[in-house]
Image (cartoon, rainbow, N blue to C red):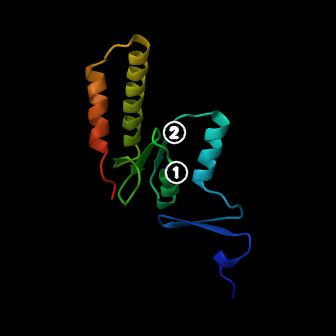
Amino acid sequence: EVHLGERSGVFLIPGHRVLEVTVRPTSKAAALMRLRAETGARRVVFAGDDVADEEVMASLGPLDVGVRVGAGPSLARFRVDRPDNVVAVLEALAVLEVATLQCQEREIEIDTPEVRDAFDLLNHTSGPSG
């Protein structure tokens, strides 16, 4: 008797309440690396809610942002409770990116309620992800 995972050319990817079966050896982390190379992206924002997403979280660089959606151990820098809360994280990151670009262009400090709110939101969603 041969089990599915023992078959030649069959690859199993465990997830949360799911077992992905593929005939190609691939991963989300490999796909992300390929997309980064093809697009020249300097930064990546990745949100995931599954144990299979942890390979991507582990591959993120210091300028990248990982967001874990839901409970469970994670290497992600940020965590939110529900998928719709990822939007708030993206909005906060966009505010901070715009403020950073404005500071670089004008060489001024930007201290606005919008920037403070963005920092507060990100500080609230960061911390130990265990």
Of helix, strand and loop, which one carries label 2? Answer: loop
Quadrant for residue 24, please give it: bottom right
Quadrant for residue 11, please give it: bottom right
Residue 23 in picture, x, y percent from top left: 71, 64
Q: Earlier in the sequence, mark 1 or mark 2?
A: 2
Tell me how far mark 1 sits from mark 2, CA to CA: 11 Å
Q: Residue at x 61, y 56 (%)?
A: 27
Toward the top, the furthest residue is: 106
Kind of residue indicated by mark 2: Val
Toward the bottom, the furthest residue is: 1
Q: Residues within 10 Å of mark 1 (few under 14, many from 20)?
A: some
Residues at badges 1 and 2 in contact (C-beta under 8 Å)? no
Say left or right for 24 vs 48.
right
Check disc 1 and report the residue beneath it: 59
Q: Residue at x 27, y 29 (%)?
A: 117
Nearest the viewer among 117 and 57 is 57
Nearest the viewer among 17 and 129 is 129
Of helix, strand and loop, which one carries label 1? Answer: helix
Residue 44 in picture, x, y percent from top left: 51, 39
Q: Which mark is residue 6?
A: none
Nearest the viewer among 23 and 106 is 106
Residue 130 in picture, x, y percent from top left: 33, 59
Check disc 2 and report the residue beneath it: 44
- 60 vs 38: above or below: below
Say left or right for 30 vs 72.
right
Residue 97 in picture, x, y percent from top left: 42, 26
Where, quadrant-wise, is the N terminus in this rendering?
bottom right
Quadrant for residue 93, please give it: top left
Say left or right for 105 vs 36.
left
- 21 vs 92: above or below: below
Q: Residue at x 74, y 74 (%)?
A: 8
